[in-house]
Image (cartoon, helix red, strand yellow):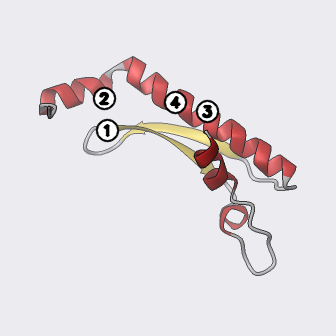
Amino acid sequence: MALSKEQWERLNRNKSVQRACEQVAQKVASRARQITAAEGGEALIRVESSQRPLGRWQARVVSDSPVEEYGAEKQKRIRALGRASREV
């Protein structure tokens, strides 16, 4: 059963849905911080919540260190966000 546009918009305005998204993101962020600390990284990890242009609610986990996430020639790849998102 497909949702109507009105149902979709109402669902994405629902505070319970928004809180659930943010709770999952906080769990991922917490685990990513643990991984970063255990691997000797220094990235600051935060959660950003917002509504996308077409109305979908999102809670993103963001690192301030793309080098730690993806690696570089002289920087070890920690990949804390990727690993945490698969574990949670």
- Amino acid type shown at disc 4: Glu
Q: Are marks 3 and 4 in contact (CB under 8 Å)?
A: yes
Between the C-alphas of marks 3 and 4, the distance is: 6 Å
Q: Is residue 40 left or right of residue 53?
A: right
In the image, residue 57 sits, relative to residue 78, either above or below, namely above
Report the front residue among 29 and 43.
29
Q: Earlier in the sequence, mark 3 or mark 1?
A: 3
Residue 79 place in picture, x, y as percent: 69, 59
What kind of residue is marked 1? Arg
Q: Which secondary structure lies at badge 4? A: helix
Q: Would residue 37 appear left or right of 23 to someone viewing this image?
A: right
Is 15 drawn above or below residue 41 in the view shown?
above
* Residue 22, numbered circle: 4
Q: Quadrant of the N terminus?
A: top left
Identify the residue under disc 2: 12
Cα separation, mark 3 vs mark 1, equals: 18 Å
Q: Residue 83: give x, y in percent of width and height.
A: 66, 52
Residue 56, numbered label: 1
At which x and y percent is residue 71? 71, 71
**In the picture, which quadrant includes the C terminus?**
top right
Amino acid type, label 3: Gln
Q: Image quarter for residue 47? A: top right
For the residues bearing labels 3 and 1, Cβ distance under 8 angstroms: no
Label of residue 26 in the image: 3
The alpha-carbon separation of the residues under discs 2 and 4 comes to: 13 Å
Tell me which residue sits at (39%, 24%) in the image: 17
Query: Label 1 neighbourhood size at 10 Å, few (<14), some (14-19), many (20+)?
Result: some
Q: Earlier in the sequence, mark 1 or mark 2?
A: 2
